[in-house]
Amino acid sequence: MPFNGLFAGYDISGSGMSAERFRMEVIANNLANAHSTRSADGGPFRRQDVVFAEVLGDAARPGRLPDLGGVRVVEVVNDPSPFIRVYQPGHPDADAEGYVSMPNVQLPIEMVNLVTAARAYEANLKAAQTFRQMNEQALGLLRG
């Protein structure tokens, strides 16, 4: 095992924490714009979600197991679900029938996603701490 492979656990946990932190930022943006009826695109705010992908090192080399590299953010995608129409005839963004198109953000779903991302972040942090403890014990054994 090459020397840099000894610390791969840190890289994997670090990439997971970084990806989940970014996911929490996107969720916070969704929550902040849950009532925004106007966006830069001209319509109501559209909910966003994060797409992750695994990072593999030498996956194409035959006869070898892939080097695990963690996870990375591939893209931020817009949720294609329809906007919520609310009857508010006095609203400045109401259409001719008095309906306002509200963002497709649902607060309970966003809160569940936020808790899930926070728990995944904590799990990656715990994995990094466990990996550190294992390395300390291994060094202690080598010192004898």
Image (cartoon, helix red, strand yellow):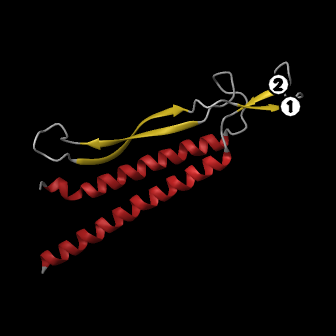
Q: Is residue 107 above or below residue 80?
A: below
The residue to which callout 2 is attached is: 94
Q: CA distance from mark 1 to mark 2?
A: 7 Å
Question: Left or right: 61 with respect to 92?
Answer: left
CB atoms of marks 1 and 2 within 8 Å: yes
Residue at 86% from the left image edge and 31% from the top image edge: 88
On screen, residue 72 versus residue 82, left or right, reads left
* Residue at left offset 25%, top offset 48%: 68
Say whether residue 10 is left or right of residue 126. Answer: left
Q: Is residue 99 above or below residue 50?
A: above
Q: Earlier in the sequence, mark 1 or mark 2?
A: 1
**In the figure, residue 102 lies in which quadrant?**
top right
Seen at 37% across and 42% down, the residue is 72
Q: Callout 2: helix, strand or loop?
A: loop
Q: x, y percentage for residue 19?
A: 43, 46
Disc 1 crowd rating (10 Å Cα; few below 14, some 14-19, many 20+) is some
- From this view, report whether residue 82 is shown above or below residue 59: above
Which image quadrant: the N terminus?
bottom left
Residue on which the image places disc 1: 88
What label does residue 56 carry, if any? none
When the figure is inspected, residue 131 is found, relative to residue 85, above or below; the finding is below
- Amino acid carrying label 2: it is Ala
Front residue of 87/8: it is 87
Q: Position of residue 3 (x, y in %)?
A: 14, 56
In the image, farthest residue toward the top: 96
Residue in view at x 12 percent, y 81 percent: 144
